[in-house]
Image (cartoon, grey):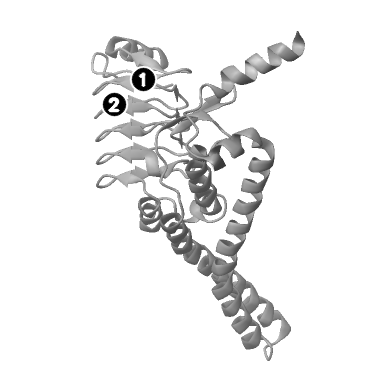
Amino acid sequence: MGNRCKQVSFSEDDSKNPPAQSFLDRLTRRYSRPAYGIAVMLIYLLASTALGLALAPALCLFNQFIVWSQNLPQSLSWVVLGFGLAVSFFVFGFVLLIIVPIYNLLLPTRVRPFKGGYYSLQAVPWFLHNGLFYLVRFTFLPFVTLTPFGIWFLKAMGMKLGRHAFINTEYISDPRLITLGDDVALGGSVRIFAHYGGHGNLVVEPVVIGHRATIGLAATVMGDVHVAADATILAHSVLMPGSRVGEGETWGGVPARRISREEMELFKKEIGIPTKNNPESEIN
């Protein structure tokens, strides 16, 4: 009886997958764990080649600093080597910013909306796209956030950005499926990603944030969320999948919900923030 229940459970879970498109897809689903292990090892190998290519010019430069420091007094040589190591790190980072988008362009990373199992060929572009993006996110992206280099990299990875978009976070996933309008502001440590999962299934759906919308400090925006123009998401709020924020609306909370203008005015009054109705309020 127990085995029968397990078989039914597996069948129900697998039925949520789109139909297998090839023999390789059927094989991947049948031997999901070994296939996943192979995919992980391949992404490590791919990451090693990208990191190695980025490190090569940095190591070449650092070797030159070693040569320059050899005839210097010891105390000064340490200064030169320290400076050379720092410069070499930034050379590595900027080269990586170029190499990873090239890999992303050449490899099968064309992520599309998807709903199904993690262990299927349809999930490979999502897995590969994020694996490449994370090489920069967890090494060098924090050093170029809020700079034109960071904006360029996000665009090169497929993120659609309007004019003067302000992005003060590196906690991003699925950049190819994220669209930000003109003058959008993402506050510090905002988490934005175009997927969610649970019960053995993966859902990949685009995120769209309209013109002049503001996403507050450390807010979370999950997959399948649309935020209309001039909307505001309060700090530390969580927009759950399927949320549709209307034009000019304010949302807040966990999970986030619409907050009326009257409710916001009352909240500001309670904590002493000056409002239109009470301009003389002071914060003690």
Q: Which mark is residue 231?
A: 2
Residue 220 in percent (x, y) is at: 46, 29
Q: Is residue 223 above or below residue 130?
A: above
Left or right of residue 247, residue 94 in this image: right
Q: Residue at x 30, y 12 (%)?
A: 260
Residue at 57% x, 78% y is 61
Look at the numbered discs 1 and 2 and tell me whether their residues touch, using CB distance below 8 Å: yes
Mark 2, Cα crowd under 10 Å, few <14 / some 14-19 / many 20+, is: many
Quadrant occupied by the N terminus:
top right
| Quadrant in which residue 27 is drawn | top right
Does 28 sit above or below residue 164? above
Q: Residue at x 40, y 12 (%)?
A: 270
92, 112: nearer the viewer: 112
Q: Nearer the viewer, residue 46 or 257?
A: 46
Residue 24 at x, y = what percent? 56, 42
SS class of the residue under badge 1? strand
Looking at the rendered structure, the kind of residue marked 2 is: Ala
State which quadrant residue 275 falls in: top left
Q: Which residue is mark 1?
A: 251
Say if residue 15 shows up in the picture. yes
Residue reaching furthest to the front? 23
Q: Could you tell me residue 112's position as x and y percent?
A: 40, 38
Q: Nearer the viewer, residue 256 or 8?
A: 8
Residue situated furthest right in the rendering: 2
Give above or below for 28 relative to 153.
above
Q: Residue furthest bottom?
A: 71
Q: Mark 1 Cα within 10 Å, few/some/many (few <14, many 20+)?
A: many
- Secondary structure at badge 2 equals loop
Mark 1 or mark 2: whose residue is earlier in sequence: 2
Up the image or down, 20 lies above or below 169; here it is above
At x 37%, y 55%, the residue is 156
